[in-house]
Amino acid sequence: MDGPWVPKGILVCLLVALLPCAMLQSLASGARDRIQLREEARRMFYHAYDNYMQYAFPHDELKPLSRTYTDSLAELGNLNHEHLPEHYNGTALTLVESLSSLAILGNATEFVKAVLWLGENLSFDVDVRVNLFECNIRLLGGLISAHLLAIEFFEGLIPGGYKNQLLHLADDLGQRLLPAFETPTGIPYAWINLKYGVMMDETLETSTSGCGTLILEMGALSRLTRNSKYEDAALKALRKLWSMRSSLDLMGTTLNVATGTWIQHSSGIGAGVDSFYEYLLKAHILFGGQEYWDMFRQAYVAVQQYFRHGPWYHEADMRTGRATYWQLTSLQAFWPSVQVLIGDVVAANATHREFVSVWEKHGVIPERYLLDIGSIHPTESYYPLRPELAESTLYLYQATKDPWYLDVGEKLLTSLNNLTRVDGGYASIRDVTTMELEDHQHSYFLSEMCKYLYLLFDDTFLSNRNYIFSTEGHPLPVLRAWQQWTPSVPPKAITESKGEAETEHTNSSAMESQVCPDFRGLSLSPQRVESACHVLDGHEDHRCTSDDGCGIDAATCRKRTCSSVGYCGLWKKG
Ligand code: DMJ
């Protein structure tokens, strides 16, 4: 991006100084349009959901072209479909993943119906080998989040015997995942059989994101069950993983869980690593304390120093910091949302804009793009309905309230409807160069894509409450009681517990009240710290009041200033 970025909303506001900004913003995006777009996002969710319920439920995911199902959680990486019971019905994965979206859409009837069905029918006592990471973020996270939302929104509607059903299921699932952590390093196996534990000759290879994206769900489960064993296991693994960083504070992408040695030394912020960074920061927000923040801060600075090239991020060798692959992956589009949470909004915007330009060029974002020659990767030209760009768009809109992001959201909605909507749901794209479709509707389309787009156009759910979203889009409340929780509190039976959701919330969204990074402790010269600009908190629409709250611009390392209408940026004074 050339020159300083001036949000469109601010320019409009400056031009017509007599009208209040908020009024102009709503005119610019069109109040009616926003409602229509919200309704379009709602229709998108129900088209995906209704078709899943009709053709695939209780199996895991919908095949929208053939209108049938896949038990993808157990089939993933299990090409021979081994250890699938004869009459296996799956885990109702898409239903579990839909619960938090149903709550946000305000559909109490369907939510309660689902809770009752899951309470009666879902069992994890099945001979299936599943991926620990996927099981954790999708099933465990989906159940925990829905349990908390049920307490907050639908408690009176759920019959007594079912009140803690989702938590019971989560607790049962959590216990089935724990044997994966029994390795010499404490870093868990990537795969686990839900009935029999770790299988004979199980692979010792896992990825950084695979073993470093467990702490939110496991920490939340520990707090809800008042049993520290889940958090203990996830934290031990995370500490070990962190201890394996290089002297440059870089991680690799894959490692051996028995020896704790790296297999693949090249890494970036995309596939195989992405949510590791995300969970360091979100664990700090959700559970508090210095340890997660220190890890995140060091890791973030290293990413900025060794991976970033202007608005893009390439891969580098963790040992030398030398660039390895000049490739963009569509998963990287989540990164601006992490930057928004720490107040690095200018850098987030710059990267987000580049991803938007790729989306505009190709209609969607291809899975992998060769940055050095500007073309789509020959074998990774698919688009599996990934939600990361919608995610970043939502976060940036929340941080800036710049209506330009609403326009981006509208474009995403339109191209998804034009390119991927079929009568039987939403289909992935096998090849973005031909737009040939693939017979798969991923459950994260309902837990993430539809939710992020809906919230972009209607953020009622986010106002006056502070939730953070797991990497799978499941909201978790930021609660003081959770931050003060210590495992020494005597355990209570979970049936007695209404969970912690009744305790006090902090009253603003984490997307707006950004975490203030303190870089003073770092022994880097200011010119080398390409990062973390904090925007003052506590203002209704996230405005600054003086230059002091604006930090350093991540792209140029220049000090940012506060504009006359209260936005941090590279404004010229006078
Ligand atoms: C989701 O399952 C999660 O966001 C995960 O962290 C990686 N990305 C997929 C969707 O693209």
Image (spheres, rainbow, N blue to C red):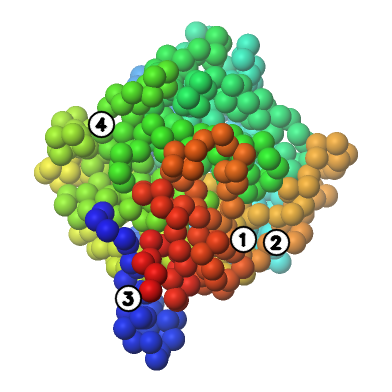
* Residue at mark 2: 505
Which quarter of the figure has residue 66?
top left
- Image location (x, y in percent) of residue 79: 35, 22
Q: Nearer the viewer, mark 3 or mark 1?
A: 3
* Residue at mark 4: 326
Residue at 36% across, 41% down = 332
- Image location (x, y in percent) of residue 533: 49, 53
SS class, disc 4: loop
| Comes first in the chain, label 4 or label 2 | 4
413 left or right, relative to 514: left
- On whether ligand 1 comes within 8 Å of the CB at mark 1, the answer is no
- Image location (x, y in percent) of residue 455: 45, 64
Disc 1/disc 4 C-alpha distance (Å): 37 Å
Residue 232 can be seen, yes or no: yes
Q: Nearer the viewer, mark 4 or mark 3?
A: 3
**Residue 466 got which mark?**
1
| Comes first in the chain, label 3 or label 1 | 3
| Comes first in the chain, label 1 or label 4 | 4
